[in-house]
Image (cartoon, coloured by chain):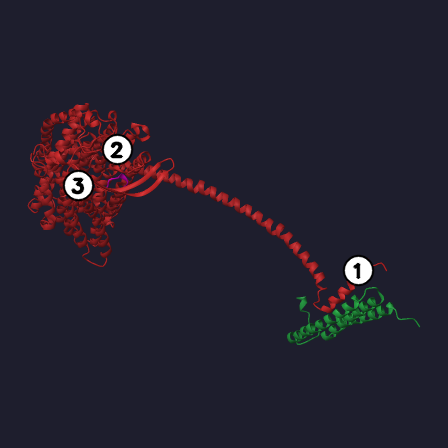
């Protein structure tokens, strides 16, 4: 039985990041894309906590993770508002159909 | 009474005719009787003038009234110094006399024209034109500087043009008006050059200031020669306006205008303006310039007199006699006989205006017949016209008891004295000869018109004496042709008030050795630089004139009598057969009949020359100048075409290639830009992975 070390955390966070990235790239629904972003943020959080736990950094990692959580909450609020507005303007939240940037 | 109101009143005299002109012209379209305004204005002007002139002449014969204001003040001009231009009025004795002459004849012509022009379709306009003429003439007379004089000089030219061409439907009238205007311009060109020379040298236009500067020794370009040139150039204006040789050709043609106009403009006033100008600039004329004036004068006296002998148009004869008489005046001024020259201007104005108005009366009675060969025997039909015409003829011939005798005799005595003093007797001899011719041709037209039997029964039967408004001016002018208005002694005008008090030879201001020798003043007068009216002639001159007087009187009586006698012998008693005599001197006769071929000569030389030069210039313009322009244009066009090609193929080509190339690149990269955020994210991640692969050594 091996003890759970830094690598385990990093693997989990990598998996989580990849899932998040996968969600951002593949999902059609804008809300799902947002959820992908949340996953990436949380994978970053895991990294911070893991390095704080196994590295010699004091409480800096935990503090930054707390900030990220707060930021994520704010981001979610703003992003959801954006999604609502997108829906209002385009009557859809399908990101494939929103290709105004092309013009 | 201090005469201070005279200038104010003369302003009224000057501008009232202008106002009359304006209202008559503007209201003429609506009011049938707007000419009455002009008549009223004319009468008012006459009354004011009588007051002004005689107040000046009787109460202030030795004072010169001047009023001026600065019109343009340029301050200190580089190279020229202080430059101001003053306008102003001046009333001295000759102004006053001239004012009276102009106003009197002008208003008489106004009254006369009421009848004469009756029924003309431009009746009101005619009177308006008379108004502007009076205005311009008053301007010439009243001004104290040569600039204003020049302005009014041109205005007179304009009004003369309007009046000569009054019946412009007739080609001959409109041609005559153009001719008069253009010929006058030639003289005015000289006058204008003279004015410019004066201004360049003296920085002023005012006569008195110019005279003052000359008398203090300032000469144009520091040379007496240039002073002579200035005098001659200014005199050129007089040559044009007074119809002197060689510019006299316009005056006979100007007879195309209405006859009262001829009386006003081409006999009494406008043509006298030239003489007036010479009188004004007399103090600054050098001996050489005066000699030139005298030569022009004597030629102008002689040539038209010979032409007048054979003309059959009554107005043409009078026109040539006018030139001849103006020549007398100019000659008198030229030989230094200033007083008689100007005096003749006054007396001539009255009797010549009378002659023209008389001729107008005849023409009116004969239904616009002007050929004296078709008249005759009109004495009984037109008694008043006849007797006044007789008086005028006696006056112009210089028969004692008339005004003409006083002045003509004076001029002849003056030229005789000039001959005695300088040995140059040409002027005197020609003067006497012209006096003979004058008497002859005047009585020729008198006899052919009024005596004998008629040669045109139809017109004769319908002829009748002219109405009161036409004969009254004649009577008045005939009265003014009697000596009593000028002097108490019918044989010698020297003691009369006109010569002893009013007309005085002005002081010459040119350097002494540039004058006629007899005009060198006494030592005492030499010191006075201030220009005043006093006699400059030395005692030698006065003595010579005294000596010349008796022979001149006798001789002029003889020649005048001879002329009249000859006229009677030729035309009344038929002692001499005119036709056979004509045959004998055929070349001379045709030469005179064709007016010395002056018109033909001018046509062949100046007009043809001018046309030739114009054609040459036109050719030069069409072929050379236009050719250069057109050539330059086609060269430019060719060059433009080439540079156009270069532009569309080379420059535009390069631009287009760049654009196409950019477009192609754009096409390639456009594919990447899908507009889908997710695609971008994939791209970002992919690129990141690539970067990591390159830069991070695993």
Chain at tag 3: B
Tell me if mark 1 has few (under 14), some (14-19) or many (20+) residues whose alpha carbon lies within 10 angstroms of its own: few
Query: In the image, residue B142 lies at what x, y percent?
Result: 21, 42
The relative height of residue B320 versus residue B465 in the rendered view (above or below) is above
| Chain in green on the image | A
The relative height of residue B169 versus residue B585 in the rendered view (above or below) is below
| Chain in red on the image | B
Q: Which residue, given by chain and number where applicable, does mark 2 sit on?
A: B212
Q: Based on the displayed image, in which of its 4 quarters is residue B273 positioned?
A: top left
Q: Residue at x 24, y 53 (%)?
A: B22
Spatial CA distance of label 3 from label 2 is: 23 Å
Chain at tag 2: B
Numbered circle sitting on residue B96: 3
Spatial CA distance of label 1 from label 3 is: 117 Å
Q: Based on the displayed image, in which of its 4 quarters is residue B607 positioned?
A: top left
Q: Which residue, given by chain and number where applicable, does mark 1 sit on?
A: B691
**Magenta residue check for B520:** no
Who is closer to the viewer here, B411 or B588?
B411
Q: Which residues are magenta?
A: B143-147
């Amino acid at each position: 039985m091996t003890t759970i070390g830094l690598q385990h955390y990093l693997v989990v966070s990598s998996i989580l990041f990849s899932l998040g990235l996968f969600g951002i790239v593949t999902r059609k629904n804008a809300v799902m894309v947002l959820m992908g972003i949340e996953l990436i943020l949380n994978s970053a959080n895991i990294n911070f906590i893991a390095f704080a736990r196994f590295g010699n950094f004091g409480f800096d990692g935990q503090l930054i993770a707390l900030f990220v959580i707060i930021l994520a909450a704010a981001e979610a609020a703003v992003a959801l508002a954006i999604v609502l507005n997108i829906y209002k303007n385009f009557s859809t939240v399908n990101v494939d159909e929103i290709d105004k940037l092309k013009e | 009474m201090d005469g201070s109101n005279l200038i104010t009143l003369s302003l009224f005299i000057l501008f009232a005719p202008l106002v009359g002109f304006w209202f008559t012209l503007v209201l003429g379209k609506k009011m049938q009787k707007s000419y009455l305004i002009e008549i009223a204005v004319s009468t008012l002007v006459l009354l004011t003038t009588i007051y002004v002139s005689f107040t000046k002449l009787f109460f202030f014969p030795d004072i010169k009234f001047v009023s001026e204001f600065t019109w343009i003040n340029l301050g200190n001009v580089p190279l020229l110094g202080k430059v101001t231009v003053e306008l102003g009025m001046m009333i001295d004795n000759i102004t006053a006399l001239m004012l009276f002459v102009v106003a009197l004849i002008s208003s008489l012509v106004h009254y006369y024209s009421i009848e004469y022009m009756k029924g003309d379709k431009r009746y009101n306009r005619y009177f308006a034109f008379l108004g502007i003429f009076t205005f311009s003439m008053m301007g010439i007379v009243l001004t104290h500087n040569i600039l204003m004089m020049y302005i009014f000089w041109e205005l007179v030219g304009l009004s003369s043009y309007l009046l000569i061409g009054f019946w412009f439907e007739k080609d001959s009238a409109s041609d005559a008006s153009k001719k008069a205007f253009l010929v006058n311009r030639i003289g005015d060109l000289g006058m204008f050059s003279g004015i410019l020379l004066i201004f360049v040298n003296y920085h002023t236009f005012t006569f008195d200031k110019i005279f003052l500067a000359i008398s203090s020794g300032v000469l144009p370009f520091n040379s007496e020669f240039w002073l002579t040139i200035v005098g001659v150039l200014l005199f050129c204006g007089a040559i044009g306006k007074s119809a002197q040789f060689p510019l006299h050709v316009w005056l006979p043609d100007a007879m195309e205008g209405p006859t009262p106009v001829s009386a006003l403009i081409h006999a009494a006033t406008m043509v006298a303006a030239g003489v007036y100008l010479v009188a004004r600039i007399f103090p600054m004329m050098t001996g050489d310039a005066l000699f030139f004036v005298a030569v022009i004068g004597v030629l102008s006296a002689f040539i038209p007199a010979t032409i007048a002998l054979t003309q059959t148009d009554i107005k043409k004869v009078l026109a040539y006699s006018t030139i001849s008489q103006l020549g007398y005046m100019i000659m008198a001024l030229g030989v230094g006989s200033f007083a008689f020259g100007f005096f003749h201007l006054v007396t001539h104005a009255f009797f010549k205006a009378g002659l023209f108005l008389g001729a107008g009366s005849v023409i009116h009675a004969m239904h616009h017949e002007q050929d004296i060969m078709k008249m005759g025997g009109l004495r009984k039909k037109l008694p008043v016209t006849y007797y006044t015409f007789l008086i005028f003829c006696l006056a112009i011939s210089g028969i004692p008891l008339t005004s003409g005798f006083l002045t003509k005799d004076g001029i002849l005595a003056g030229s005789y004295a000039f001959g005695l003093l300088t040995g140059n007797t040409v002027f005197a001899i020609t003067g006497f000869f012209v006096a003979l011719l004058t008497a002859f041709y005047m009585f020729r037209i008198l006899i052919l018109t009024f005596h004998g039997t008629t040669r045109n029964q139809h017109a004769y039967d319908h002829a009748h004496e002219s109405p009161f408004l036409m004969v009254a001016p004649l009577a008045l002018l005939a009265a003014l042709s009697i000596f009593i208005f000028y002097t108490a002694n019918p044989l010698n005008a020297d003691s009369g008030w006109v010569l002893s008090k009013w007309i005085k030879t002005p002081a010459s201001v040119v350097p002494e050795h540039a004058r006629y020798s007899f005009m060198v003043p006494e030592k005492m007068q030499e010191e006075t630089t201030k220009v005043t009216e006093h006699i400059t002639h030395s005692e030698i001159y006065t003595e010579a004139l005294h000596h010349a007087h008796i022979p001149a009187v006798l001789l002029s009586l003889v020649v005048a009598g001879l002329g009249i006698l000859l006229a009677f012998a030729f035309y009344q008693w038929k002692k001499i057969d005119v036709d056979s005599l004509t045959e004998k001197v055929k070349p001379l006769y045709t030469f005179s009949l064709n007016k010395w071929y002056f018109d033909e000569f001018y046509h062949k030389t100046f007009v043809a020359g001018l046309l030739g030069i114009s054609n040459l210039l036109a050719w030069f313009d069409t072929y050379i100048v236009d050719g250069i322009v057109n050539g330059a244009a086609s060269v430019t066009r060719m060059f433009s075409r080439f540079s156009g090609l270069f532009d569309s193929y080379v420059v535009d080509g390069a631009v287009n290639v760049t654009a196409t190339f950019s477009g192609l690149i754009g096409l390639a990269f456009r594919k990447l830009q899908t507009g889908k955020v997710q695609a971008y994210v994939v791209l970002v991640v992919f690129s990141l992975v690539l970067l990591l692969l390159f830069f991070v050594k695993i």
